[in-house]
Image (cartoon, helix red, strand yellow):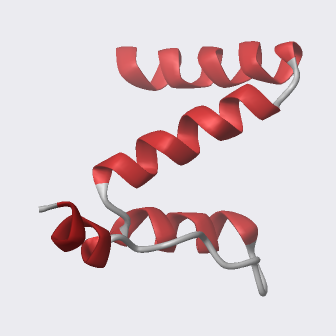
Amino acid sequence: MSDALERMRKGAPIPPLMNAMEEARDWAATATPFERKAWLLACFDAISPKEQAGFLAYVSRRASA
């Protein structure tokens, strides 16, 4: 089962060629749920506390809309 799941993975995002957000959205659209969660948490942990607070405020506004 793990071999099958490994073959289904999208792999790491490629460096953006033009627009970083567009490249990220394209990658996320085809990544597995596990990959999206792993990258999201890793990226969140890598940003500053101030950036984390801004991110959480942004997603909280979207969730309540």
View extreme (bottom): residue: 17
- Where 33 falls versus 18 (above or below)? above
- In this picture, is 63 found above or below 42? above
Q: Name the quarter where the C terminus is drawn.
A: top left
Q: Is residue 47 left or right of residue 39?
A: right
Name which quarter of the figure residue 42 lies in.
Answer: top right
Apparent side of residue 25 relative to residue 23 in the rendered image (left or right): left
Q: Position of residue 6 (x, y in %)?
A: 30, 69
Residue 52 falls in image quadrant: top right
Q: Residue 45 appears in which quarter of the rendering?
A: top right
Q: Note whether residue 65 is visible.
A: no
Q: Position of residue 55 (x, y in %)?
A: 67, 25
Q: Residue at x 45, y 26 (%)?
A: 62
Is 16 displayed left or right of 59 in the figure? right
Q: Residue at x 28, y 78 (%)?
A: 7
Which residue: 78% across, 84% down? Answer: 18
Q: Is residue 24 left or right of residue 44?
A: left
Which residue extends farthest left?
Answer: 1
Count of marks overlaid on the render: 0
- Quadrant of the image for the N terminus? bottom left
Q: In the rendered view, tell whether residue 37 sits above or below residue 13.
A: above
Can residue 14 be seen here?
yes
The image shows residue 38 at horizontal and vertical percentages of: 49, 42
x and y percentages locating residue 51 in the rendered image: 82, 24
Q: At x 66% / y 63%, what residue is drawn?
A: 21
